[in-house]
């Protein structure tokens, strides 16, 4: 078997309370590993998927990693090249942590490495984003962009597909608890009301603007006052067991803010440092321990690199 390129693409927390479809940040762990190598057979071929418990298709056009790889090769005009792809899922599927985005990001980055960097890292964004249509029905960037370039990212909607890195205060850390129930992104979007009251839109916009100012000024008090979601969280919270109990526990133990990661069911607590994040993570986990419900806990700094070659 030919040698290949192995990469790690991190999980991500999207929305970040007040930034629905606009904000996201990358985690150090968990994430996906993707291996690519050349093949004598033209096209993209998924040879192996591990860690997915049979939930992901091997058919290239139905797998986000496969679609992203195809879109990249089409853009590069590589019609005869053959690529073999292995996908090793190191993160839960349907968790609200950008599982499909990590797969797509890993695939395009690995292929770009294999082809000796025809594109810059940021130029890979649209191909990974396009693959998100499979899981969510639209080319969302709020998981893809942080998984690709790392950090806290603000994305633009509309015709401009752009991602902007925001500064993060030194030491910022997050506790993420994933209760082992699956919430698919498409379902979580379908329950959202299509109309937003004007006063709620204004309030949410003020939180988003203040959060960005707080990040630039490293103002933890302002960040804490801004991590509020008055539109999406109230609609999705009923889908997540013990959400409000978990949120209250995190805030009681010093979290700057606590809300739903992506479409859920994962719940994140953004904290000023790793010590507080550990305390919050333990208190959040205790809710599910008491309920005798399975969960996974992740404690992570904000990943500043994004996808990397292993």
Image (tube, rainbow, N blue to C red):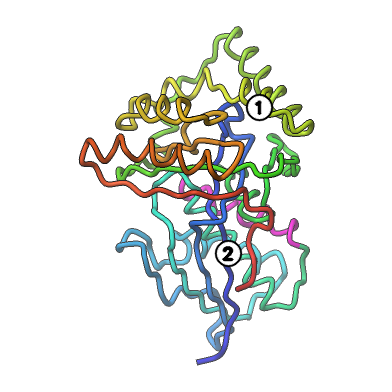
Residue 172 x, y percent position in the rendering? 63, 41
Q: Residue at x 75, y 33 (%)?
A: 218
The residue lying toward the viewer, choosing from 210 and 203, is 210
Q: Quadrant of the C terminus?
A: bottom right
Residue 138: x %, y % from top left: 55, 42
Callout 1 environment at 10 Å: few (<14), some (14 to 19), or many (20+)? many
Counting residues from the start of the chain, the first of labels 2 and 1 encountered is 2
Q: Indicate yes or no whether the magenta region holds residue 208.
A: no
Q: Which residues are magenta?
A: 121-137
* Direction bottom: furthest residue: 1
Residue 153: x and y in percent read: 68, 42
How many neighbours does mark 2 have within 10 angstroms: few (below 14), some (14-19), or many (20 or more)? many
**Which one is nearer the viewer's eye here, 222 or 104?**
222
Residue at 59 percent across and 51 percent down: it is: 130
Q: Which residue is mark 1?
A: 223
How many discs mark residues in the rendered view? 2
Residue 123 as seen in the image, left or right of residue 148 = right
Q: Are marks 2 and 1 in contact (CB under 8 Å)?
A: no
Prevailing secondary structure class for the magenta stretch in the rendered image: helix
Q: Which residue is mark 2?
A: 106
Please indicate whether residue 154 sits to the left or right of residue 90 in the image. Answer: right
From the viewer's side, name the closer residue of 201 and 248.
Answer: 248
The vertical placement of 162 against 307, above or below, is: above
What's the CA distance linking mark 2 and mark 1? 31 Å
Closer to us: 269 or 18: 269
């Amino acid at each position: 078997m030919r040698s290949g390129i192995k990469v790690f693409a991190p999980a991500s927390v999207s929305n970040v309370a007040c930034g629905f479809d606009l904000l996201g940040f990358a985690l150090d762990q968990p994430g996906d590993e993707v291996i690519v190598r050349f093949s004598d057979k033209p096209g993209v071929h998924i040879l192996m998927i591990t860690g997915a418990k049979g939930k992901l298709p091997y058919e290239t056009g139905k797998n986000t990693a496969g679609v992203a790889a195809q879109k990249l090769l089409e853009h590069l005009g590589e019609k005869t090249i053959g690529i073999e792809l292995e996908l090793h899922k190191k993160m839960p599927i349907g968790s609200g942590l950008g599982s499909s985005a990590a797969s797509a990001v890993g695939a395009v980055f690995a292929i770009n490495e294999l082809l000796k960097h025809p594109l810059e890292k940021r130029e890979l964004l649209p191909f990974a984003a396009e693959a998100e249509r499979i899981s969510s029905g639209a080319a969302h960037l709020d998981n893809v962009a942080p998984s690709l370039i790392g950090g806290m990212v603000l994305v633009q909607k509309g015709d401009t597909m752009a991602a902007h890195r925001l500064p993060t205060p030194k030491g910022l850390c997050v506790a993420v608890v994933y209760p082992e129930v699956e919430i698919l992104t498409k379902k979580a979007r379908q329950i959202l009301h299509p109309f937003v009251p004007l006063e709620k839109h204004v309030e949410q916009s003020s939180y988003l603007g203040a959060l960005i100012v707080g990040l630039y000024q490293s103002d933890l008090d302002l960040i804490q006052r801004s991590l509020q979601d008055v539109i999406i969280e109230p609609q999705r919270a009923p889908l997540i067991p013990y959400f409000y109990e978990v949120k209250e526990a995190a805030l009681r133990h010093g979290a700057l803010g606590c809300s739903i990661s992506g479409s859920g069911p994962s719940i994140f607590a953004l904290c000023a440092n790793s010590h507080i994040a550990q305390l919050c993570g333990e208190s959040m986990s205790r809710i599910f321990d008491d309920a005798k419900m399975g969960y996974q806990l992740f404690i992570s700094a904000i990943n500043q690199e994004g996808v990397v070659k292993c």
